Image (cartoon, rainbow, N blue to C red):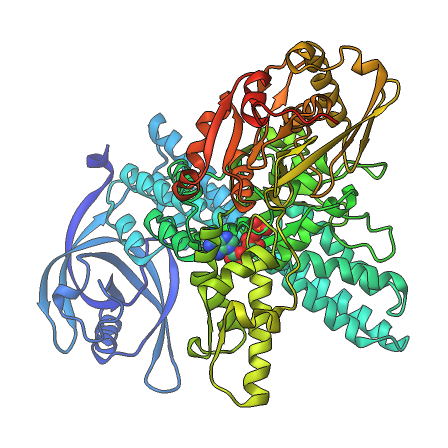
Amino acid sequence: MTEQNEKISQRTLPLIPLRGLTVFPYMVLHFDVGRERSINALEEAMVSDQMIFLSSQKEAETSSPGAEDVYEVGTISRIKQMLKLPGDNIRVLVEGISRGRVKQFVQEIPYFMVEVEEWEESDLPSEDPETEALMRSVIDAFEKYIEVSNKISPEIFMTITEIENPGRLADSIAANIILKPHQKQEILEAFEAVERLEVLYRFLLEEIEILEIEKKINTRVKKQINKVQKEYYLREQMRAIQKELGEDEGVVEEVDQYRKQLKKIKLPKELHQKIEREIDRLTKLPASSAETGVIRNYIDWVLNLPWHKETKDRLDLKRSAEILDEDHHGLEKVKERILEYLAIRQLSKSMKGPILCLVGPPGVGKTSIGKSVARSLDRKFVRMSLGGMRDEAEIRGHRRTYIGAIPGRIISSIRQAGTRNPVFLLDEIDKLANDFRGDPASALLEVLDPEQNNDFTDHFMEIPFNLSKVMFITTANSLDTIPRPLLDRMEVIRIPGYTEDEKLAIAEKYLLPKQIKDHGLQPENLKVSEKALREMINSYTRESGVRNLERQVANICRKVVRRIVEEDIKFVRVTPGNLKKYLGTPQFRYEMAAQKDEVGIARGLAWTVVGGDTISIEVTPMKGTGKLELTGRLGDVMKESARAGISYIRSRVDMFGIDPDFHSKQDLHIHIPEGGTPKDGPSAGITMATAVISALAGIPVRKDVAMTGEITLRGRVLPIGGVKEKVLAARRAGIRKVLLPKDNEKDVEEIPENVRKKIEFVFVEHMDQVLEHALVQGEKDDH
Ligand code: ADP
C-alpha cells in the first residue's frame, strides 16, 4: 500500500538546526532564531520559495554545529511568518509539510544547504483493520495520558481523534505530548505509519506509568503537608488561646519537647498514639491541676525507658574466665558451671533457657559473681532484692489511679540500667512472701518466663515492655522455700561457703586491697598480719561467707585512716595483739568441743542460714508420765525426730539396761542451748537419739565426736544436706570424729583436702553404729 500512497522526490533546501525541538508534518509552531548561520538560512528561504529544512541537533548544547551534529531526518517546512525581536533575534512561525532525509550537505557557510529526499505521504484513511485497531489503542492510551497528565485540553483531544489517516494521527499526537527530544526524533524517523504508531504507543504507555507514579507521590506528599499544616495551625491557635487565658506558655514548649522525644523512642503505632493522647491531655488541663502532675510523671517514665537501647554482647569465653578469676578466689566448680552456661548461651545465640540460680549462705560472692558475668558480657548490671516482698504490686506496680503511684521494681530497675538487656540479679528469691495482697511469685514467674516476658505489662505503665533480652540471675540462701514453679525454671549452682584458709586468702587478696583502696590508703600504709586475719575470721565473725569479714576489714581501714590523719604516722601494722584496739572485744566464741565426756549431751552438726554450726543437744530425764518437752528453738520436724528416736530406743532397752517402761514413767526434757535454728530439722535425728539413750542409760557421750543424720523408727540412718558446711563447722569447733550417713559418703569429696585430713569420718547406716562410735565404751554412770 505504501508504494501506491507515498512518493519520494529530491530537492535542495537551506537548513536550520533546531535545539531541543522537533517539528512534525502538519504541525504549526514558532521558535526564535539567533545564530548567524540560521538567520542567513532563513533569509535564503525567504528569497526563494519560503521552504526550509528543519532538523534537530543531536545535542542541544552544541552552539555551532557541523554537518555531523544534526540528525539526518528532519521536516521540510514552510515559513509562515517572521517577527523581528529586540536584539538580533527573529521569531519564526513555521508549518511542517513532510518528512525528509538529508542526502548530502551542499554547503555549510554562510548557511547550511542540503540536498533532501522528500517523503510525501498519503492523506487517505486507513483501510487495514490491523492498523485501525492500532489507531484505537493509541487513541485510548492518549485519552488516558490526558487524564493523568492534566495538560491537554479536551478540545485538542476531540480534534485529534477525528483524524483518520494513521500517519497523521501519530504525528499529531506526538506533537502534542511531552516527550524527550530523542523520543520525538525516533517517531519522526519512523517513515511507515504503522511503525510510527507502534513507537508512539510504546512511549505513551511508558509516560502514563511514570505520570501515575508521580501523581501518587504528589498526593501523598500533599496529604502530609496538609496534615502538618493543619496541626501547626491548630497548635498556634491553641497557643494563642492559652496566652489569652494567661496560662503558662511553658506547657506548650514542654509538650513540644515531649512530642519530639516520643518520636525518637519509636514505639509501635498504637502505643505511640496512646502516649500522644496523654501528651495532648497535658495541654487541655489547667497547668496547676493535680492531674497534670500525674500525667507528667507518667510521660516521663515512658520517655525514659530504654525501649530499644541495648549494649552489644561481648561473647568471649576466655575473657569471661579471666574476669571471673580476677574477681574471685577459688570457687572453681562455680566458675566452671558459669562458663558452661555462657558457652551454651553463646552457641544457641538466644537468652532463652533456664535461669541461673546461685544458692548459698550470705557473703559467699553470689552478687559479685553476677556482677562479673555482666562485666564479662559488657552488659549493664542491676540488682533487686526480693527479700520480704509480699505485694505483687512491688513487682508489677500500682495502677495510675493511686496517688503517687510508680511502676514496679522491675521496670524501675530497667530504667536504672538504661538498657533493655542488662544482667538482672534477683536477690533472695527464697525470701518471697505471699499474702492477701497478691502473689509476687506468680508475677515473678511471668517476668522470668521467656514465653511471656516479651510483653511484660506493668500496671502503672499500661504498655508492654520487652524483657526477653534481659539476662536474669537469681540468688537464694536455700532452695526449701523457693516456690516450686519458679524452681523448675532455674538451673541451680551451689556456692557452699568458705573454709578458714579460703577466707584468709580472700581477705588477703581481695578484701584488704579493695578496702585499702576504697579508703584512700596506699598499700604501704597498712598491713594486717595473717594471725590477725585468722583471729578476725574466728572471733569477730561467724559466717560462711566473707561479708562481715569485709565489714571488719573496713572498720580497721577507717580507724587507720583516722590515725594517719590525726597522729601523722605513715604505717600501721595490725596483729592479734592490737586487734582489740581496732575492733573491740571479740563478738563470737565458737562453741568448742566439750571439755569432758558427758552424759545426756550429744553434739550435732546443723546447717543454718549462716552456714554450718555445731549444736549441743541436752536431755534430762525426769519422773513423770512419758511426756516429751522440747525447749530452745525447735520446729515440729525436730519433735518428730525425737519420737522416732524414742521408738528405736524402746527396741534396744535390753542392750543398754534401760528400764523397759521408761516411756510411761519418765518425762524427757530436750533442750538445744545455742546456735541458730537449723534449717534441716530431721538431720538432728541421730544426735537427739544419742543424747536420749545416753541420758536414760547413764553412758557418757564422747566429747570429740559430732554427728548428723536423719533417723527412722527402726533406727536406720538417712542422708542429709550441707555436708561441707557442717564438716567445716565441726573442724572449727575442734571435733576429731564426724559421723555421717553412709549415703553422704560421696559429698566428702567437696571438702578441702587440708580439712579432710584432720577429721576422721565414719559413715553409718544404722543407729547401732552411731552409738558404737559416740558412746564411751564400757562406762556407765550410775546416778
Ligand atoms: P552474696 O551476694 O553471696 O551475699 P556478695 O557477692 O555480696 O555475697 O559478697 C560479699 C563480698 O565478698 C563482696 O565484696 C565480694 O566481692 C566478696 N567475695 C565473696 N566471695 C569472694 C571470693 N571468692 N573472692 C573474692 N571476693 C569474694
| Percent of width and height locating residue 555 | 60, 69
663 vs 674, nearest the viewer? 663
| 361, 316: nearer the viewer | 361
Quadrant assignment, res 596 = top right
Res 153 seen here = no
Rendered residue at 32%/38% (across/down)? 198
Quadrant of the image containing the C terminus = top right
Instruction: Find residue 380 and report its horizontal and vertical position in percent.
Output: 52, 56
**Residue shown at 70% from the left, 30% from the top:** 600
Q: Is residue 782 left or right of residue 525?
A: right
Q: Which of the two residues, 673 or 57, is positioned nearer the viewer here?
A: 673
Tell me where residue 193 appears, x and y as whole percent.
Answer: 29, 40
Placement of the N terminus among the 4 image quadrants: top left
The answer to whether residue 479 shows anywhere in this view is: yes
> Is 197 above or below relative to 561?
above
Answer above or below: position of 699 versus 269: above
Percent coordinates x, y for residue 403 in the rendering: 87, 56
Measuring 57% from the left and 83% from the top, which residue is drawn there? Answer: 563
The image quarter in which residue 489 lies: top right
Residue at x 56%, y 48% (from the top left corner): 544
